[in-house]
Amino acid sequence: MTTQTNENNIIIQANDLSIYYGSFRAVKNVNLGIQRNKITAIIGPSGCGKSTVLRAFNRMNDFVQSAHNDGKILFHGQDIYAPEVDPVQVRQMIGMVFQKPNPFPKSIYENIAWGARINGYKGNMDELVENTLQAAALWDEVKDNLKKSALALSGGQQQRLCIARALAVKPEIILMDEPCSALDPIATLKIEDLMRELSVKYSIIIVTHNMQQAARASDLTAFFTMDEDRAGLMVEYGETSQIFTRPKDKRTEDYITGRFG
Amino acid sequence: MASMEITQNINQSSAQNISTRLRRQTRIGENLIQGFLFLCGMISIFTTIGIVFELGKESLLFFSTPEVKLIEFFTTTTWQPSIGKFGVLPLVNSTLMTTIFAMLIALPLGLAAAIYLSEYASHKARSILKPILEILAGIPTVVYGYFALTFMTPLLRGIFGEDNVQIYNTLSAGLVMGIMILPLVSSMSEDALSAVPRSLRDAAYGLGATRLETAIKIVLPAALSGIIAAFIIGISRAIGETMIVAVAAGSGPAFTFNPFKGAETMTGYIARISGGDLAYDTPDYNSIFAIGLLLFGITLILNIVSRRLVAKYREVYE
Ligand SMILES: Nc1ncnc2c1ncn2[C@@H]1O[C@H](COP(=O)(O)OP(=O)(O)O)[C@@H](O)[C@H]1O
Ligand SMILES: [Mg+2]
């Protein structure tokens, strides 16, 4: 399935992507072009392979021994699964924020500095910490407690710290896997506002099972569902407003109107 | 319809018997189990108290004999009960030496094996290596003793020269003790590493960390308290190990820092004297209780210090 969008603006592109866990095909034949500086939401029922696809975009599936792919993922035209590509470099350029906030059991400062340091950042660390915390809308809340353990923060603050930590590595794309599912509504709105600000500089892909969130916070939406053989597939992809008001596919319509299953 | 009837029934019955239904139940099984578990805890506490009491009592006897002076016991370097010289330092020294040699093997290799098993090994490699380590842990220590005497010592003598290395020496005993303790250290460390949540590794990998950076800078610090505990148990084990040193380290107290010379350890001495035909209530015989108490004290201090260290440096994850 292709979209009516500008091909030059594609930053990462899945081409005929199928992902297997052992012999089980979890995702089949996905063609998805992600646009630069846009927020792309991936929605769909539980188990349809949203996380699997997302984790394929920065090779986090490499850590699942049984996982392997067919097809290609092109990042600026380069296949990130080509043998000469270093997955560590891929993950530096394509960062990730996880479902459950997972700050390191270190200080707030160290949480941000760590990723930058291992990636060879030589600049002023204090400045970087301040800038990324500002960018993640967390600076005002933590500036007097940078030495405090990150685990003392609230869930919403922890998640913004995880976003700041990802920014400190200077990625181009930020992948978010249901980043708000463990947060209360106010913290959720804060993250959504933050995503909007970040999309000026970064391209964001967010997996969510919250349709209001996709409708509120994203520019484009990809709807996934499952086949009879439990393989996930992409049904429809387009402008968020179009998907939620004039879906082309019956299955999309059923899902967004709550008639799924 | 059916479901509505059921709800009504429940409502009625609970309205009628609510006080009966909510009344406190006596659960005899629950109480019995609780009592039994309490008893088990008590047994281990009383055993410890009993041992300390017995050691203390006999040590008091030892220290109250006229030939024995507390200061000399701790500060002089000759242990020759037959001529009334009771300086414990030679025994302590050789215990420390064998322990240090053992730890030079067990701590780095044990930790490296643990990191490999928990962070690098495939399922297949792990399923082969773990049973091998467990077998290593199950070999009786007397066998290790003879392994030291018939394999390690000849090896050392081959490398360093027969003139330099005595048949009984602390280095051989210590190294083999390290091999014996290695599986303990590695399996406890691996447990600690594996208990670090997957999500922390994901966080590190997601930032573009390599496996090594993740293992050393994220997983290891997060598992530090468990790893230090493994080290302390390994050290305690080495200090208390008896059979290997009794067989391979030599059976005569000697104050030497030369690892190629034989020197009896505290445990080796206790084993020899308690197995020998010395009369009870002689200072020679009673001395083993004093040494036993000292051993107990050393491991106790080790435990206390390590708890302090752990509390200070660990990174708590949820
Ligand atoms: N590590 C794994 N090993 C085997 N199967 C997996 C693994 N992770 C996910 N799956 C399977 O892949 C399918 C898609 O999972 P996932 O991508 O997590 O779905 P979603 O995020 O849309 O809920 C599910 O059937 C799930 O059981
Ligand atoms: Mg998921």
Image: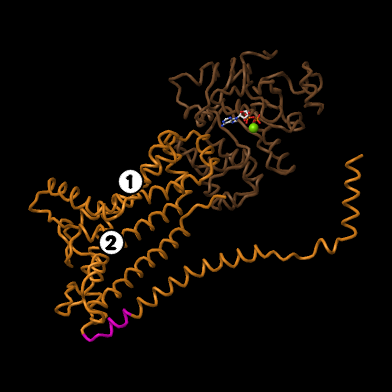
Asked whether mark 2 and ligand 1 are closer than 8 Å, the reply comes as no
Q: Is residue A127 above or below residue B283?
A: above
Q: Residue at x 51, y 21 (%)?
A: A80
Q: For the residues carrying marks 2 and 1, which lies nearer the camera in this image? A: 2
Residue type (three-letter) at the residue carrying disc 1: Leu
| Displayed quadrant of residue A58 | top right
Q: Main secondary structure of the magenta part?
A: helix
Colour chosen for chain A: brown
Count of labels in the image: 2
Q: Which mark is residue A129?
A: none
Q: List the residue tagged with mark 2.
A: B242
Q: Which mark is residue B109?
A: 1
Q: Which residue range is magenta in the image?
A: B58-66
Element type where label 1 sits in the image:
helix
Q: x%, y% of residue A136?
A: 63, 39
Is label 2 in a helix, a strand or a loop?
Answer: loop
Observer-nearest of B303 and B239: B239
Residue A113 image position (x, y, % from top left): 50, 42
Location of residue B117 (image quadrant):
top left
Q: Residues within 10 Å of mark 2 (few under 14, many from 20)?
A: many
In which quadrant of the rendered view does residue B82 lie? bottom left
Q: Is residue B245 magenta?
A: no
Q: Which shade of the palette goes to chain B? A: orange
